[in-house]
Image: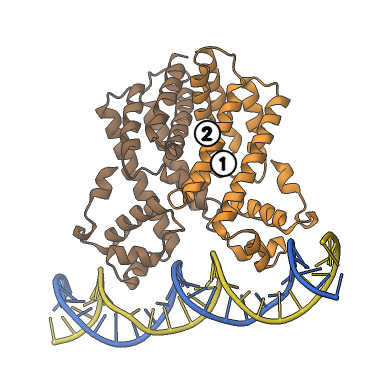
Chain colours: A brown, B orange, C yellow, D blue
Amino acid sequence: MEILHATAIADVASARERLLLTAHRLFYRHGIRATGIDRIISEAGVAKVTFYRHFPGKSDLISAYLESRHERWIAWFSDALRRHGDDPEALIAALGEWFGQPDFRGCAFINGVGEMGAELPDIVAIARRHKQAMLTIIMRLLKPGKGRKQLAESIALAVDGAIVRAQYEANPRDALPPLRRALKALVRS
Amino acid sequence: MEILHATAIADVASARERLLLTAHRLFYRHGIRATGIDRIISEAGVAKVTFYRHFPGKSDLISAYLESRHERWIAWFSDALRRHGDDPEALIAALGEWFGQPDFRGCAFINGVGEMGAELPDIVAIARRHKQAMLTIIMRLLKPGKGRKQLAESIALAVDGAIVRAQYEANPRDALPPLRRALKALVRS
DNA sequence: TTATCAGTAGACAGATCTGTCTACACACAA
DNA sequence: TTGTGTGTAGACAGATCTGTCTACTGATAA
């Protein structure tokens, strides 16, 4: 996840990409409604007309933001789990990496649904796809067998809980011990 | 929770109470930033001056909303658990009640932190107090003994996960079976 | 060379936001 | 009777929001 925000936006050639990167940073940090188009185009160094030539409206930018966030997050998640051994315990290590990021602000999809889910149903649809993909990846960490999917669903539930808790806790990593305990109890069950 | 929104706002005597009830309904349903003062005062049937006489600014109304939400939710939660037997399984039944409400839109505190936590630190502080109170109530469902608090923390984590999942799932109650499984594994552990 | 594409700056419209202000009404207690 | 407290309606200021518009620039391909 850090790779994304470390990208120097000025170096990115296309205006569309600069808009997307800037929107990603601002939407995630300050929230979607709190971030105006004017600020995005100003920080992306792009003209207003150019923005509206690439995105018919703000909603389209929001969707594009979430789509790109989805791809990046899933790629990071798979990679982090692989680096940490591709077993259930790797979940703790991977999430620990994420929670330790200085710009960690929780799950973009949970936040998006909470903020605008009632107004923009697209956000809910993308969030569902995202969580489905997360579930599939978690499932691959488990031994095949009956009830693997149900087990993965309970683990995914706990992971969502940990992400949310990491967001309101003073020290995000305080969410890890309760998650580890839930994980161990579930895997043994 | 339904009791709250069933209250006929016009019947409430004081302007302050009408403002709080209306803010509660609109903030919870549409989000905090999406809800303007003008709409709140108009739907509460209150003059603008009256609003600003009771609340110095919108932030104060937001805090008051969350404080009142906190009290109401905790009262409902204790009561629902008692009605369902005051054991860990009662959690499923109680949450099932909540998730089944037509106006269910997740946890007001998780949503608030996600939407404005970075801008209004008060929201994070209230959210922490709220989740601490939830933890204490969950702890009372468990047999005393070593590790009861840690167990309660893992259960609370799973509960937060279930609340979040119920919010983005098409059928909120789909979050209950994975929660039940996590709960059983944890209580047995 | 000329059309097309992707870009720039910045004014503008119209809505909506928070917060302030004036002027008035009514109940009630000292 | 005279404050005081609580309420009303609604205009206003100033900022900010999304989205449109005009007019210009430079590169590149037919």
Q: Position of residue A49 (x, y in %)?
A: 34, 73
Q: Could you tell me which residue is drawn at 67 percent across and 44 percent down? A: B102
Q: Nearer the viewer, residue A62 or B81?
A: B81
**Residue A2 locus on image (x, y percent):** 27, 43
Q: Which residue is mark 1?
A: B107
Between A97 and B97, the residue placed more toward the observer is: A97
Q: In the figure, residue C23 lies in which quadrant?
A: bottom right
Q: Residue at x 32, y 25 (%)?
A: A90
Q: Chain letter of disc 2? A: B
Query: Disc 2 on helix, strand or loop?
Result: helix
Residue drawn at the location 64% of the way across and 45% of the way down: B68
Q: Give the image quarter of residue C1.
A: bottom left
x and y percentages locating residue B27 in the rendered image? 59, 53
How far is mark 2 from mark 1, CA to CA? 8 Å
Give, as a three-letter code, the residue at label 2.
Asp
Residue B124 in view (yes/no): yes
Residue A125 shows in the view:
no
Point out the tag, 2 or 1, that comes first from the N-terminus.
1
| Quadrant of the frame with the N terminus of chain B | top right
Vertical placement of C21 versus B108: above or below?
A: below
Mark 2 near mark 1, Cβ–Cβ under 8 Å?
Answer: yes
**Disc 1: which chain?**
B
In front of the other: D19 or B92: B92
Q: Which residue is mark 2?
A: B160
x and y percent of residue A168 in the render?
Answer: 45, 39
Left or right side of A151 for B173: right
Q: Amino acid at mark 1?
A: Cys
Residue A113 in the image: above or below residue B150? below
Indicate the secondary structure of the residue bearing disc 1.
loop
